């Protein structure tokens, strides 16, 4: 029993460290885009390999737990959920890196601060960061009701993403020379929306762990971009 508890603590510690890193990546790339800060975006890019390394560490620790301790019941559900959460966090890191690439390579004066404001990107980032924090707290406090709050926020992020299409179409119609730039921006917005989707997946995994209840899975799409 003691060995089981120590192994669980080790996995949770690694996951918590990865979570902080990924949340930091999203915070930095949000500031990079909203403040047009290329240096911050480059910092996000430089830390992407750290996210990948943490994913491998958590995966390895989970594999060892399954192989050596053959967990059952709540411990089994917890470890299965952690495996999925780990994957979702890594994908969130990928999306943050993809947004950073946009800031470094495609963000220019044709994408005006006024356009960014109309697209509600600041609020979109705020909601996804709140979703990440809610999921982290829900797992730490074993609170499925807190995890459930994530889904309403995901609906808001989806609404902002859907509204962005009309805003961008209007802007491209008025500024034909900015069409390519707006298409790159739309891809970045889609990545923010995907971060929200992955947070919803994490919330579902937490509910499964705590209540042994499978929620309807959000479609992550047949082929996600990075």
Image (tube, grey):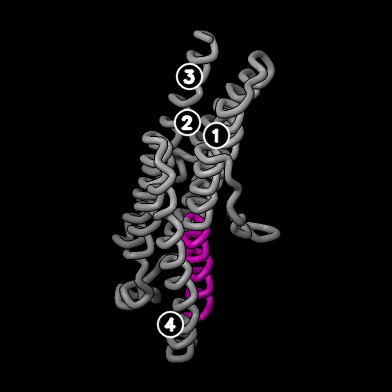
Q: In the current view of this chain or complex, which residue is farthest to the top?
A: 2
Q: Nearer the viewer, mark 4 or mark 3?
A: 3
Q: Nearer the viewer, mark 2 or mark 1?
A: 1
> Mark 2 or 1 closer to N-term?
2
Cα distance, mark 4 to mark 2?
38 Å
**Span highlighted in magenta in the image:** 178-195
> Mark 4 or 3 closer to N-term?
3
Question: Label 2 neighbourhood size at 10 Å, few (<14), some (14-19), many (20+)?
Answer: many
Q: For the residues labelled 2 and 1, say whether their Cβ atoms are less than 8 Å apart.
A: yes
The answer to whether residue 125 is left or right of residue 100 is left
> Mark 1 or 3 closer to N-term?
3
Q: Is residue 6 visible?
A: yes
Secondary structure, mark 3, is helix
Q: Is residue 40 visible?
A: no
The residue located at (43%, 48%) in the rendering is: 147
Q: Which residue is mark 1?
A: 82
Q: Which residue is mark 3?
A: 10
Q: Which residue is mark 4?
A: 167
Q: Nearer the viewer, mark 4 or mark 1?
A: 1
């Amino acid at each position: 029993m003691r060995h089981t508890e120590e192994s669980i603590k080790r996995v949770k510690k690694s996951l918590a460290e990865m979570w902080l890193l990924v949340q930091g990546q999203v915070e930095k790339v949000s500031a990079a885009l909203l403040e047009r800060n290329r240096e911050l975006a480059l910092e996000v890019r430089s830390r992407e390999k750290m996210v990948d390394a943490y994913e491998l560490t958590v995966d390895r620790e989970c594999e060892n737990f399954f192989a050596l301790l053959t967990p059952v019941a709540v411990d089994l559900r917890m470890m299965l959920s952690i495996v999925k959460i780990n994957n979702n966090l890594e994908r969130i890191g990928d999306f943050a890196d993809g947004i950073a690439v946009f800031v470094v390579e495609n963000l220019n004066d044709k994408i005006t601060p006024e356009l960014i404001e109309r697209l509600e990107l600041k609020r979109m980032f705020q909601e996804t960061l709140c979703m990440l924090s809610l999921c982290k707290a829900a797992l730490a406090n074993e609170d499925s009701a807190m995890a459930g709050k994530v889904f309403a926020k995901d609906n808001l992020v989806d609404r902002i993403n859907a509204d962005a299409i009309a805003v961008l179409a209007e802007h491209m119609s008025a500024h034909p020379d900015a069409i390519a730039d707006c298409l790159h921006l739309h891809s970045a917005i889609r990545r923010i929306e995907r971060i929200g989707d992955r947070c919803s997946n994490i919330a579902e995994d937490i509910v499964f762990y705590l209540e042994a209840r499978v929620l309807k899975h959000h479609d992550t799409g047949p082929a996600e971009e990075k």
